[in-house]
Protein backbone atom coordinates (compact mmCIF):
# COMPACT_ATOMS: atom_id res chain seq x y z
CA UNK A 1 0.00 0.00 0.00
CA UNK A 2 1.37 3.32 -1.08
CA UNK A 3 -0.26 6.68 -0.37
CA UNK A 4 0.39 9.46 -2.85
CA UNK A 5 1.09 12.59 -0.81
CA UNK A 6 0.10 14.68 -3.84
CA UNK A 7 -3.31 13.05 -4.15
CA UNK A 8 -4.12 12.46 -0.45
CA UNK A 9 -6.78 14.78 0.98
CA UNK A 10 -6.22 13.77 4.65
CA UNK A 11 -9.85 12.78 5.18
CA UNK A 12 -9.18 9.74 7.38
CA UNK A 13 -11.43 7.26 5.56
CA UNK A 14 -8.50 4.83 5.17
CA UNK A 15 -7.84 5.06 8.92
CA UNK A 16 -11.45 4.07 9.63
CA UNK A 17 -11.21 0.76 7.75
CA UNK A 18 -7.62 -0.39 8.46
CA UNK A 19 -7.91 -3.76 10.23
CA UNK A 20 -4.30 -3.54 11.46
CA UNK A 21 -4.76 -0.03 12.91
CA UNK A 22 -1.50 1.10 11.37
CA UNK A 23 -2.80 4.33 9.84
CA UNK A 24 -3.03 7.58 11.73
CA UNK A 25 -4.44 10.92 10.62
CA UNK A 26 -2.51 13.93 11.79
CA UNK A 27 -3.98 17.26 10.69
CA UNK A 28 -1.92 17.50 7.51
CA UNK A 29 -1.01 13.94 6.55
CA UNK A 30 -1.66 10.24 6.96
CA UNK A 31 1.04 8.56 9.02
CA UNK A 32 1.73 4.93 8.07
CA UNK A 33 3.09 2.64 10.78
CA UNK A 34 4.69 -0.80 10.31
CA UNK A 35 2.51 -3.87 9.80
CA UNK A 36 0.54 -3.45 6.56
CA UNK A 37 -0.83 -6.81 5.40
CA UNK A 38 -1.91 -5.59 1.95
CA UNK A 39 -5.63 -6.18 2.51
CA UNK A 40 -6.21 -3.12 0.27
CA UNK A 41 -9.37 -1.99 2.10
CA UNK A 42 -7.88 1.50 2.28
CA UNK A 43 -7.45 1.49 -1.51
CA UNK A 44 -11.12 0.63 -2.01
CA UNK A 45 -12.49 3.40 0.22
CA UNK A 46 -10.12 6.29 -0.60
CA UNK A 47 -12.40 8.99 -2.09
CA UNK A 48 -9.55 10.41 -4.18
CA UNK A 49 -8.00 7.15 -5.35
CA UNK A 50 -4.76 8.25 -3.70
CA UNK A 51 -3.75 4.77 -2.49
CA UNK A 52 -2.10 2.29 -4.83
CA UNK A 53 -0.48 -1.12 -4.59
CA UNK A 54 3.18 -1.09 -3.67
CA UNK A 55 5.57 -0.07 -0.95
CA UNK A 56 5.39 3.29 0.79
CA UNK A 57 8.66 5.12 0.32
CA UNK A 58 8.13 7.66 3.09
CA UNK B 1 6.04 16.55 30.24
CA UNK B 2 3.33 18.98 31.22
CA UNK B 3 0.54 17.68 33.46
CA UNK B 4 -3.07 18.88 33.44
CA UNK B 5 -6.25 17.83 35.21
CA UNK B 6 -9.89 18.07 34.14
CA UNK B 7 -13.20 16.43 34.94
CA UNK B 8 -13.75 15.50 31.29
CA UNK B 9 -11.52 15.42 28.22
CA UNK B 10 -13.40 15.53 24.91
CA UNK B 11 -11.43 14.38 21.88
CA UNK B 12 -12.62 16.22 18.76
CA UNK B 13 -14.05 19.73 18.44
CA UNK B 14 -16.73 19.43 15.78
CA UNK B 15 -20.48 19.08 16.36
CA UNK B 16 -20.20 15.98 18.57
CA UNK B 17 -17.33 17.26 20.71
CA UNK B 18 -18.58 20.82 21.03
CA UNK B 19 -22.11 19.71 21.91
CA UNK B 20 -20.98 17.20 24.55
CA UNK B 21 -18.62 19.74 26.11
CA UNK B 22 -21.22 22.52 25.94
CA UNK B 23 -23.73 20.54 28.00
CA UNK B 24 -21.08 19.18 30.39
CA UNK B 25 -19.71 22.70 30.99
CA UNK B 26 -23.22 24.09 31.49
CA UNK B 27 -23.58 21.57 34.33
CA UNK B 28 -20.46 22.99 35.92
CA UNK B 29 -17.81 20.45 34.92
CA UNK B 30 -14.21 21.34 34.07
CA UNK B 31 -13.96 20.30 30.43
CA UNK B 32 -11.16 20.30 27.88
CA UNK B 33 -11.60 19.80 24.12
CA UNK B 34 -8.65 18.47 22.18
CA UNK B 35 -8.81 19.24 18.44
CA UNK B 36 -6.19 17.88 16.06
CA UNK B 37 -6.67 20.58 13.44
CA UNK B 38 -5.34 24.10 13.69
CA UNK B 39 -8.78 25.50 13.16
CA UNK B 40 -12.16 24.21 14.31
CA UNK B 41 -14.56 23.64 11.42
CA UNK B 42 -12.10 22.88 8.63
CA UNK B 43 -11.72 20.87 6.54
CA UNK B 44 -15.48 20.48 5.96
CA UNK B 45 -16.55 16.84 5.58
CA UNK B 46 -20.27 17.26 5.22
CA UNK B 47 -23.07 18.06 2.75
CA UNK B 48 -24.28 20.58 5.38
CA UNK B 49 -28.01 19.80 5.50
CA UNK B 50 -29.79 19.33 8.81
CA UNK B 51 -33.25 19.47 10.33
CA UNK B 52 -34.76 21.90 12.83
CA UNK B 53 -34.47 19.22 15.54
CA UNK B 54 -30.72 19.98 15.69
CA UNK B 55 -31.47 23.46 17.01
CA UNK B 56 -34.15 22.21 19.36
CA UNK B 57 -31.64 19.83 20.95
CA UNK B 58 -29.01 22.55 21.16
CA UNK B 59 -31.53 25.00 22.65
CA UNK B 60 -30.40 27.54 20.06
CA UNK B 61 -32.29 29.55 17.48
CA UNK B 62 -30.96 29.00 13.95
CA UNK B 63 -28.97 32.12 13.10
CA UNK B 64 -28.12 33.68 9.75
CA UNK B 65 -24.52 33.74 11.03
CA UNK B 66 -24.18 30.08 9.97
CA UNK B 67 -27.44 29.12 8.21
CA UNK B 68 -27.10 29.63 4.44
CA UNK B 69 -30.50 28.58 3.36
CA UNK B 70 -33.87 27.18 4.37
CA UNK B 71 -35.02 23.95 2.74
CA UNK B 72 -38.69 23.26 2.05
CA UNK B 73 -38.50 19.86 0.40
CA UNK B 74 -36.63 17.61 -1.98
CA UNK B 75 -36.64 16.32 -5.55
CA UNK B 76 -35.61 12.70 -5.95
CA UNK B 77 -34.52 11.23 -9.29
CA UNK B 78 -34.61 7.51 -10.14
CA UNK B 79 -31.98 6.06 -12.51
CA UNK B 80 -34.24 6.53 -15.56
CA UNK B 81 -34.74 10.19 -14.65
CA UNK B 82 -38.29 9.80 -13.37
CA UNK B 83 -38.72 12.24 -10.59
CA UNK B 84 -40.54 12.43 -7.27
CA UNK B 85 -41.18 15.57 -5.27
CA UNK B 86 -41.28 15.74 -1.48
CA UNK B 87 -42.79 18.79 0.16
CA UNK B 88 -42.12 19.68 3.80
CA UNK B 89 -42.11 17.18 6.64
CA UNK B 90 -39.02 14.99 6.76
CA UNK B 91 -37.32 16.85 3.91
CA UNK B 92 -37.58 20.25 5.60
CA UNK B 93 -34.56 21.88 7.20
CA UNK B 94 -31.51 24.08 6.75
CA UNK B 95 -28.25 24.20 4.86
CA UNK B 96 -25.46 25.19 7.20
CA UNK B 97 -22.09 26.77 6.59
CA UNK B 98 -20.34 24.11 8.67
CA UNK B 99 -17.10 26.08 8.97
CA UNK B 100 -19.04 28.80 10.79
CA UNK B 101 -21.49 26.51 12.59
CA UNK B 102 -18.77 24.28 14.10
CA UNK B 103 -16.78 27.33 15.14
CA UNK B 104 -19.92 28.91 16.64
CA UNK B 105 -20.62 25.76 18.68
CA UNK B 106 -17.04 25.71 19.94
CA UNK B 107 -17.34 29.38 20.90
CA UNK B 108 -20.60 28.71 22.76
CA UNK B 109 -18.92 25.83 24.55
CA UNK B 110 -15.92 28.01 25.45
CA UNK B 111 -18.28 30.69 26.76
CA UNK B 112 -19.83 28.04 29.01
CA UNK B 113 -16.37 27.38 30.41
CA UNK B 114 -14.81 24.72 28.16
CA UNK B 115 -11.05 24.96 27.56
CA UNK B 116 -9.90 24.13 24.03
CA UNK B 117 -6.52 22.98 22.73
CA UNK B 118 -6.16 23.12 18.94
CA UNK B 119 -3.44 21.40 16.88
CA UNK B 120 -3.28 18.73 19.53
CA UNK B 121 -3.38 14.99 18.91
CA UNK B 122 -4.12 12.13 21.28
CA UNK B 123 -1.27 9.62 21.36
CA UNK B 124 -2.44 7.29 24.13
CA UNK B 125 -4.94 6.85 26.93
CA UNK B 126 -4.13 7.01 30.61
CA UNK B 127 -5.45 3.71 31.93
CA UNK B 128 -5.91 2.84 35.58
CA UNK B 129 -7.48 -0.26 37.06
CA UNK B 130 -10.88 1.46 37.19
CA UNK B 131 -10.71 2.28 33.46
CA UNK B 132 -9.77 5.20 31.21
CA UNK B 133 -8.50 8.16 33.25
CA UNK B 134 -7.38 10.71 30.69
CA UNK B 135 -5.17 11.00 27.65
CA UNK B 136 -1.58 11.55 26.64
CA UNK B 137 -1.58 14.16 23.91
CA UNK B 138 0.90 15.99 21.78
CA UNK B 139 0.68 19.72 21.09
CA UNK B 140 3.42 20.70 18.62
CA UNK B 141 6.51 19.26 20.31
CA UNK B 142 5.07 19.25 23.85
CA UNK B 143 3.74 16.06 25.39
CA UNK B 144 0.78 16.63 27.69
CA UNK B 145 -0.44 14.21 30.29
CA UNK B 146 -4.07 15.11 30.88
CA UNK B 147 -5.80 13.35 33.74
CA UNK B 148 -9.59 13.21 33.68
CA UNK B 149 -12.42 11.31 35.33
CA UNK B 150 -13.96 10.70 31.93
CA UNK B 151 -13.04 10.78 28.26
CA UNK B 152 -15.58 11.46 25.49
CA UNK B 153 -14.36 10.26 22.08
CA UNK B 154 -15.83 12.48 19.37
CA UNK B 155 -12.95 11.98 16.97
CA UNK B 156 -14.83 11.12 13.78
CA UNK B 157 -14.76 8.10 11.47
CA UNK B 158 -10.99 7.86 11.89
CA UNK B 159 -11.53 7.41 15.65
CA UNK B 160 -8.64 5.72 17.36
CA UNK B 161 -9.49 6.80 20.90
CA UNK B 162 -12.47 4.48 21.38
CA UNK B 163 -10.46 1.63 19.86
CA UNK B 164 -7.60 2.30 22.28
CA UNK B 165 -10.18 1.74 25.03
CA UNK B 166 -11.18 -1.59 23.52
CA UNK B 167 -14.39 -0.59 21.70
CA UNK B 168 -14.85 -1.73 18.12
CA UNK B 169 -15.52 1.37 16.04
CA UNK B 170 -13.85 0.08 12.87
CA UNK B 171 -15.68 0.49 9.57
CA UNK B 172 -15.49 -1.60 6.39
CA UNK B 173 -15.78 -0.67 2.70
CA UNK B 174 -19.34 -1.96 2.90
CA UNK B 175 -20.32 -0.01 6.02
CA UNK B 176 -18.80 3.27 4.86
CA UNK B 177 -19.83 5.47 1.94
CA UNK B 178 -16.82 7.07 0.34
CA UNK B 179 -17.70 10.68 -0.50
CA UNK B 180 -16.43 13.56 -2.61
CA UNK B 181 -18.11 16.94 -2.96
CA UNK B 182 -17.57 20.22 -4.76
CA UNK B 183 -18.98 23.45 -3.49
CA UNK B 184 -19.88 24.97 -6.85
CA UNK B 185 -20.82 28.39 -8.16
CA UNK B 186 -23.30 28.84 -11.00
CA UNK B 187 -25.51 25.85 -10.23
CA UNK B 188 -28.97 26.40 -11.63
CA UNK B 189 -31.45 24.86 -9.21
CA UNK B 190 -34.36 25.83 -7.00
CA UNK B 191 -32.67 27.31 -3.91
CA UNK B 192 -35.12 25.77 -1.43
CA UNK B 193 -35.16 22.14 -2.58
CA UNK B 194 -32.58 19.39 -2.14
CA UNK B 195 -31.88 17.13 -5.12
CA UNK B 196 -31.02 13.43 -4.91
CA UNK B 197 -30.02 11.26 -7.88
CA UNK B 198 -29.84 7.47 -7.69
CA UNK B 199 -28.34 4.86 -10.02
CA UNK B 200 -25.54 2.30 -10.37
CA UNK B 201 -23.92 4.31 -13.14
CA UNK B 202 -23.69 7.60 -11.25
CA UNK B 203 -23.36 6.47 -7.62
CA UNK B 204 -23.28 2.72 -6.87
CA UNK B 205 -24.22 2.01 -3.24
CA UNK B 206 -25.03 5.65 -2.54
CA UNK B 207 -26.39 8.70 -4.33
CA UNK B 208 -25.56 12.07 -5.82
CA UNK B 209 -26.76 15.16 -3.99
CA UNK B 210 -27.19 18.79 -4.96
CA UNK B 211 -27.81 20.90 -1.85
CA UNK B 212 -28.36 24.58 -2.62
CA UNK B 213 -26.66 27.15 -0.42
CA UNK B 214 -28.32 30.12 -2.14
CA UNK B 215 -27.16 32.61 -4.77
CA UNK B 216 -26.37 29.87 -7.30
CA UNK B 217 -23.94 28.15 -4.93
CA UNK B 218 -24.50 24.48 -4.09
CA UNK B 219 -22.83 21.44 -2.58
CA UNK B 220 -22.68 18.86 -5.35
CA UNK B 221 -21.49 15.55 -3.97
CA UNK B 222 -21.30 11.82 -4.52
CA UNK B 223 -21.33 9.02 -1.96
CA UNK B 224 -20.42 5.56 -3.27
CA UNK B 225 -19.46 2.06 -2.26
CA UNK B 226 -17.45 0.85 -5.24
CA UNK B 227 -14.51 -1.57 -5.41
CA UNK B 228 -13.24 -0.16 -8.65
CA UNK B 229 -13.84 3.58 -8.98
CA UNK B 230 -13.20 6.43 -6.57
CA UNK B 231 -15.86 8.84 -5.33
CA UNK B 232 -13.86 11.64 -6.95
CA UNK B 233 -14.10 9.98 -10.39
CA UNK B 234 -17.87 9.76 -10.03
CA UNK B 235 -17.97 13.40 -8.92
CA UNK B 236 -15.94 14.50 -11.94
CA UNK B 237 -18.23 12.54 -14.21
CA UNK B 238 -21.44 13.96 -12.72
CA UNK B 239 -20.22 17.56 -12.71
CA UNK B 240 -18.60 17.44 -16.18
CA UNK B 241 -21.95 18.29 -17.78
CA UNK B 242 -22.65 21.17 -15.39
CA UNK B 243 -21.64 24.65 -16.31
CA UNK B 244 -20.51 25.42 -12.75
CA UNK B 245 -17.22 26.25 -11.08
CA UNK B 246 -15.88 24.51 -7.97
CA UNK B 247 -14.54 26.69 -5.16
CA UNK B 248 -13.96 23.86 -2.69
CA UNK B 249 -13.37 20.09 -2.73
CA UNK B 250 -14.48 18.11 0.32
CA UNK B 251 -13.85 14.43 0.93
CA UNK B 252 -14.68 11.96 3.66
CA UNK B 253 -16.61 8.89 4.67
CA UNK B 254 -20.12 8.38 6.04
CA UNK B 255 -20.97 5.33 8.16
CA UNK B 256 -24.16 3.79 6.73
CA UNK B 257 -24.49 0.60 8.76
CA UNK B 258 -25.90 2.04 11.95
CA UNK B 259 -24.28 2.60 15.35
CA UNK B 260 -21.35 0.54 16.61
CA UNK B 261 -22.19 -2.35 18.97
CA UNK B 262 -21.13 -0.61 22.17
CA UNK B 263 -20.67 3.11 22.81
CA UNK B 264 -19.30 3.15 26.37
CA UNK B 265 -16.72 1.46 28.56
CA UNK B 266 -15.10 2.18 31.93
CA UNK B 267 -14.29 5.91 31.90
CA UNK B 268 -15.18 6.54 28.23
CA UNK B 269 -18.13 7.31 25.96
CA UNK B 270 -18.01 7.56 22.15
CA UNK B 271 -20.26 9.92 20.13
CA UNK B 272 -20.96 10.99 16.56
CA UNK B 273 -19.40 9.51 13.41
CA UNK B 274 -16.97 7.57 15.61
CA UNK B 275 -19.99 5.77 17.10
CA UNK B 276 -21.75 5.40 13.73
CA UNK B 277 -24.52 7.72 14.95
CA UNK B 278 -25.74 8.51 11.44
CA UNK B 279 -29.01 7.69 9.67
CA UNK B 280 -28.01 4.82 7.38
CA UNK B 281 -30.53 5.59 4.64
CA UNK B 282 -29.84 9.28 4.16
CA UNK B 283 -26.35 9.52 5.63
CA UNK B 284 -27.56 12.49 7.69
CA UNK B 285 -25.76 12.67 11.00
CA UNK B 286 -25.84 16.16 12.48
CA UNK B 287 -29.17 15.90 14.31
CA UNK B 288 -28.40 12.38 15.57
CA UNK B 289 -24.91 13.31 16.73
CA UNK B 290 -26.05 16.47 18.48
CA UNK B 291 -28.70 14.52 20.37
CA UNK B 292 -26.35 11.71 21.41
CA UNK B 293 -23.57 14.15 22.32
CA UNK B 294 -25.90 16.19 24.52
CA UNK B 295 -26.86 13.00 26.34
CA UNK B 296 -23.17 12.10 26.74
CA UNK B 297 -22.45 15.56 28.22
CA UNK B 298 -25.35 15.25 30.65
CA UNK B 299 -24.45 11.69 31.66
CA UNK B 300 -20.87 12.88 32.23
CA UNK B 301 -22.18 15.47 34.69
CA UNK B 302 -24.24 12.87 36.56
CA UNK B 303 -21.34 10.43 36.63
CA UNK B 304 -18.92 12.94 38.06
CA UNK B 305 -21.38 14.30 40.58
CA UNK B 306 -21.93 10.76 41.87
CA UNK B 307 -18.28 9.75 41.50
CA UNK B 308 -19.30 6.81 39.32
CA UNK B 309 -17.57 6.49 35.97
CA UNK B 310 -17.63 2.71 35.54
CA UNK B 311 -19.28 1.21 32.49
CA UNK B 312 -22.08 0.06 34.75
CA UNK B 313 -23.02 3.69 35.28
CA UNK B 314 -22.19 4.95 31.77
CA UNK B 315 -24.49 2.34 30.26
CA UNK B 316 -27.27 4.88 30.79
CA UNK B 317 -25.73 6.96 28.00
CA UNK B 318 -26.46 4.18 25.50
CA UNK B 319 -29.85 3.38 27.03
CA UNK B 320 -30.89 7.01 26.68
CA UNK B 321 -29.69 7.67 23.14
CA UNK B 322 -31.21 4.39 21.99
CA UNK B 323 -34.51 5.41 23.56
CA UNK B 324 -34.40 8.72 21.66
CA UNK B 325 -33.10 7.66 18.24
CA UNK B 326 -32.41 3.90 18.33
CA UNK B 327 -35.74 3.00 16.71
CA UNK B 328 -35.32 5.55 13.90
CA UNK B 329 -31.79 4.38 13.17
CA UNK B 330 -32.94 0.75 13.00
CA UNK B 331 -35.76 1.62 10.61
CA UNK B 332 -33.41 3.70 8.49
CA UNK B 333 -30.96 0.77 8.33
CA UNK B 334 -33.76 -1.48 7.07
CA UNK B 335 -34.44 0.95 4.22
CA UNK B 336 -30.71 1.15 3.50
CA UNK B 337 -30.46 -2.65 3.26
CA UNK B 338 -33.43 -2.79 0.90
CA UNK B 339 -32.02 0.02 -1.22
CA UNK B 340 -28.69 -1.82 -1.42
CA UNK B 341 -30.37 -4.80 -3.03
CA UNK B 342 -32.36 -2.94 -5.69
CA UNK B 343 -31.23 -2.92 -9.30
CA UNK B 344 -31.67 0.28 -11.31
CA UNK B 345 -34.67 -1.24 -13.07
CA UNK B 346 -36.31 -2.09 -9.73
CA UNK B 347 -35.62 1.43 -8.45
CA UNK B 348 -37.38 2.83 -11.51
CA UNK B 349 -40.42 0.62 -10.95
CA UNK B 350 -40.54 1.49 -7.25
CA UNK B 351 -40.19 5.20 -7.98
CA UNK B 352 -43.12 5.09 -10.41
CA UNK B 353 -45.24 3.27 -7.82
CA UNK B 354 -44.34 5.64 -4.98
CA UNK B 355 -45.01 8.66 -7.16
CA UNK B 356 -48.67 7.69 -7.40
CA UNK B 357 -48.99 7.26 -3.63
CA UNK B 358 -49.56 9.64 -0.79
CA UNK B 359 -46.35 8.81 1.11
CA UNK B 360 -47.90 9.52 4.49
CA UNK B 361 -50.59 6.89 3.99
CA UNK B 362 -49.80 4.22 1.41
CA UNK B 363 -52.80 1.89 1.46
CA UNK B 364 -52.54 -1.85 1.89
CA UNK B 365 -54.67 -2.35 -1.21
CA UNK B 366 -52.28 -0.38 -3.40
CA UNK B 367 -49.33 -2.33 -1.92
CA UNK B 368 -51.05 -5.63 -2.72
CA UNK B 369 -51.73 -4.50 -6.27
CA UNK B 370 -48.09 -3.49 -6.67
CA UNK B 371 -46.74 -6.80 -5.36
CA UNK B 372 -49.14 -8.71 -7.65
CA UNK B 373 -47.70 -6.85 -10.64
CA UNK B 374 -44.10 -7.07 -9.43
CA UNK B 375 -43.73 -10.19 -7.27
CA UNK B 376 -39.96 -9.68 -6.90
CA UNK B 377 -40.67 -6.93 -4.37
CA UNK B 378 -42.67 -9.15 -2.04
CA UNK B 379 -39.66 -10.23 0.00
CA UNK B 380 -38.34 -6.69 0.29
CA UNK B 381 -41.66 -5.22 1.32
CA UNK B 382 -42.19 -7.92 3.94
CA UNK B 383 -39.09 -6.61 5.68
CA UNK B 384 -40.47 -3.09 5.98
CA UNK B 385 -44.02 -3.95 6.99
Image: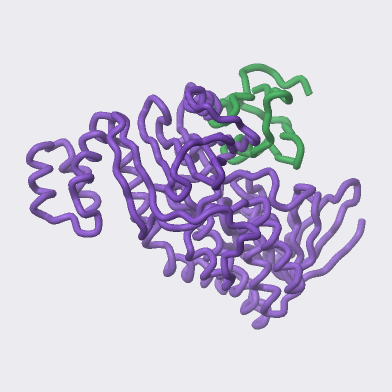
| Chain B image colour | purple
Q: Left or right: B228 with respect to A11?
A: left
Q: Where is residue A8 in the image (x, y as percent from the top left)?
A: 68, 29
**Outermost residue, top direction?**
A54
x and y, in percent, of residue A27 in the image = 75, 42
Question: Residue placed at 75% from the left, 68% from the top?
Answer: B110
**Relative depth, front residue between B353 and A1:** B353
Choose top left, top right, bottom left or bottom right for residue B370: top left
For the residue pair B340 and A54, the one nearer the viewer reads as B340
Q: Is residue B328 left or right of residue A50?
A: left
Compared with residue B377, is residue B325 higher up or lower down, i.e. above or below? below
Q: How many marks?
A: 0
Q: Is residue A18 visible?
A: no
Residue B319: x percent and y percent? Answer: 47, 69
Percent coordinates x, y for residue B276 in the rendering:
51, 51
Where's the C terminus of chain B, which quadrant?
bottom left
- Residue B181 sits above or below residue B126 on the image: above
Q: In which quarter of the image is residue B111?
A: bottom right
Residue at left offset 60%, top offset 74%:
B298
Residue occupying image coordinates x 56% and y 56%: B272
Residue placed most toward the observer, B126 or A5:
A5
Q: Is residue A57 in sight in this rendering?
A: yes
Residue B196's place in the image compared with B343, above or below, is below
Q: In which quarter of the image is the N terminus of chain B?
A: bottom right
Instruction: Give left or right: position of B80 versus B104.
Output: left
Give the farthest residue toward the bottom: B306
Q: Chain A is drawn in which colour?
A: green
**Chosen colour scheme:** by chain
Q: Is residue B109 left or right of residue B317?
A: right
Amino acid sequence: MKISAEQCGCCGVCVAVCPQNILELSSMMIITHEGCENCNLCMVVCPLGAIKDGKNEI
Amino acid sequence: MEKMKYDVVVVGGRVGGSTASLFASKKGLDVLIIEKNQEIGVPVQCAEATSSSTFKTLEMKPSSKYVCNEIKGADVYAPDGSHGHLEGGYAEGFILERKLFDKHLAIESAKAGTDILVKTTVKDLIRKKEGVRGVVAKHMDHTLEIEAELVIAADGIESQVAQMAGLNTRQTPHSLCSCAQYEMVGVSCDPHYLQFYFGQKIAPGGYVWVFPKGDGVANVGVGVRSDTTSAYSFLRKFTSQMNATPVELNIGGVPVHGPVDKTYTDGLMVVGDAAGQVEPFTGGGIHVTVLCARIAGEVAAEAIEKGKTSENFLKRYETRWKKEVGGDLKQSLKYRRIMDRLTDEEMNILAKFLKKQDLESISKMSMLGFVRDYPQFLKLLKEIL
